[in-house]
Amino acid sequence: MKKLTFKINELDCSEEVAILKKALVPVVGREEFLDFDLLENRLTIEFNPETGMTGEQIVGIISGTGLKAVLLENGKTGNEKFENPEMPWICNKRNLYFSISALFFITGFTVHYFSTDLLQAFTGSFNKVPGQTEYIIRSFYVLSALVGGRYIYPKAWFSLKNLRPDMNLLMTIAVTGAFIIGEWFEAAFVVMLFSLALLLESWSIQKARNAIKTLIGLKPLTAKVKNIETGEIDELPVEEIETGSILIISPGEKIPLDGKIVNGGSYINQAAITGESIPVHRTTGDEVYAGTLNEEGMIEVKSSKKVDDTTLSRIIELVEKARSKRARSEQWIDRFAAYYTPAMIFLALIIATAPPVLLDGRWLEWFYQALVILVIGCPCALVISTPVSIIAGLTSASRNGIIIKGGIFLETLSRLKAVAFDKTGTLTYGRPAVREIIAMNDHSEEQILKSASALEIHSSHPVARSIVEYTRNKKIEFTPAEEFKLKMGMGAEGSLNGKRICIGNTRLMKENGLDSTGYYEKIEGMENRGITPLALCEKDHICAIIGISDEVRSNASGTVMELKKSGIGKVVMLTGDNQKTASAVAEATGIDDYQSGLFPEEKAAAVGELQNSSGETAMIGDGINDAPAMASASIGIAMGGIGSDSAIETADITLMSDNIERLPWLINHSRKTLGIIKQNIFFALGLKLLFVILAVGGYASLWMAIAADMGASLLVIFNSLRLLNNGD
């Protein structure tokens, strides 16, 4: 089998995918031979070379659909302009056409309004408009429809040529019918709304592309490599570094490749990979990962993987694949259009010919009734029913601090069966803080905080900063310790008022030969509750145990309870943190189940298993490590206030205020939106069915059909706009 890859301009949504499938499946034989990558605007085709098919022939077929394609060689087109580099918003063609269409529409409506009144302008009536002004208004509406339909009409023509009606043909017939019967305002308004809906979907895909760029930006471009024989250090591009090379990573630098530490030790911020809120100490023999940050000590790392095989690279690949697969879904209205449009045309033909031929009816009379069928069959209300409801739903959500990147995601929320939470920064606040102080050997809390802060003021570690912040919030003054010394992997020590003091974990206590009755029982008790214990000691005794943990959000348990009440069958937690901490958070929040110690690919796999067992699943997270899981889920939801850029851009929905309490409202809002869409569709179809019956009985007139069609469109719009008031 042979593979060819093409870059396709404006390949942004499932609509284009459906069109290309219709054109190419008959040529290549099977749909499975077509692999669409909407993130990169690419299509890979697998076919038997014996067919004699060439890349140029496929480009010709794609061009026939109204899209433009270029055959890729070695991943490059050789045409920088076609690659569509970063450009101002207005320079994007889809944005530009919509903006011009909206400008023409608003101008026409404004002239109409000042020529008559608001009611006349909104109903599209020209009864009171001066003759010359009427032509000006109509011209603006026609221009709005022509420009707004730039990406609709060519695809409609392709659909018509192939006798395969789709949404584009449905739209084109609606607009043409509206113009023919003189509904200029309605025609332009429908095109502009539909153009806006397509623009929102295109914008969503573009944000996904930006997420990949953000992830790639985590990769260091160069690394310092040590020559084992000479000891010299060279700076090389990461692509040229072989497995087994010795890398030198200074404090504050990102680790360029996966590997093991062979010399030194340091605290490594692994949030980009594991999501852990507290940097972990790594020393000789420990594994480290590309994209993580070396915070304190100089380390030497022996690389174990090349740049394209690192954990970070796998995260990028997972995001790409998951987003590409998501774009394969098709809208219900596309499938419905395949039957509705030809059915209405066929019905009109039957009414125009059958009565005169079979019942000796009058040709002119039944031709008129056929026109009534075509007019009431004009699917304007149907076409408007979905985009207006979606736009109103998205606007209402944004007013409530929730950004939804497209209508498909708003609709999917209504079908959720399971929700998966990340822990750090999602169910918890994502920052360590002092939770508990156990004083020992007659030390007061004030003495403990003074001594602990005297040491920790010298460190930039998040735990150290939390102790200093806690002391300052209590307005306790302290003096920095002297002779400060960092004890890698254990803690720190120094001198205060002539006394030797130290703070750290049990390893540091053992090194200093310190023990105390009940000490280990107390720290075990803290650990069982998900709290990290630190011991403060003087030369010959332990002064206190200070408990540090990431606080569970105050509204987390209430949110979990409300989600279950709203019909979510399974609420779980997926975290890279340790088992004891995860267990404590799960118990505090009422989570049904949890998995701990997960890497990004394991989180994504867990989400996949949850979807297989429970159905549509949402993943809520805040870190880059959550991006693959969010992309794999039916819906990815990011914490916007503290979430990483990658998580936000990869996610389908963003909680801008980090308020997870809005999740139950969001799901109910989605269900209400979908309910209104169904109301609109049933109402529009019901009204059309009524007029079909009246037309067959000879009781309907053309003006009644026009009034009913416009009235249906207005009622659908007003019903949809109710969503704008859907607050708390």
Image (spheres, rainbow, N blue to C red):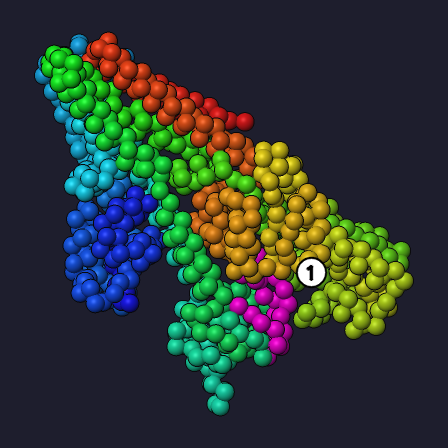
> Where is the C terminus found, in terms of image quarters?
top right
Residue at horizontal 64 percent and vertical 57 percent from the top: 596
Q: Which residues are magenta?
A: 263-289
Report crowding for label 1: few under 14, some 14 to 19, many 20 or more residues within 10 A (C-alpha): many
Going by the numbered disc 1, the residue's amino acid type is Glu
Residue at horizontal 25 percent and vertical 65 percent from the top: 48
The reply to whether residue 505 is visible in this rendering is yes
In this view, the residue in front, 684 or 462, is 684
> Where is the N terminus found, in terms of image quarters?
bottom left
Taking the image as shown, residue 431 lies to the left or right of residue 390, namely right
Taking the image as shown, residue 530 lies to the left or right of residue 700, namely right
SS at mark 1 in the image? helix
Residue at horizontal 88 percent and vertical 64 percent from the top: 516
| Residue 396 in magenta stretch | no
Looking at the picture, does residue 475 appear above or below residue 244?
above
| Residue 285 in magenta stretch | yes
Mark 1 — residue? 456
Looking at the picture, does residue 34 appear above or below residue 10?
below
The reply to whether residue 366 is visible in this rendering is no
Residue at horizontal 33 percent and vertical 45 percent from the top: 14
Percent coordinates x, y for residue 618 in the rendering: 52, 45
Taking the image as shown, residue 115 lies to the left or right of residue 581, namely left
In this view, the residue in front, 222 or 448, is 222
Percent coordinates x, y for residue 259 in the rendering: 53, 74
Please count the marks in the image: 1
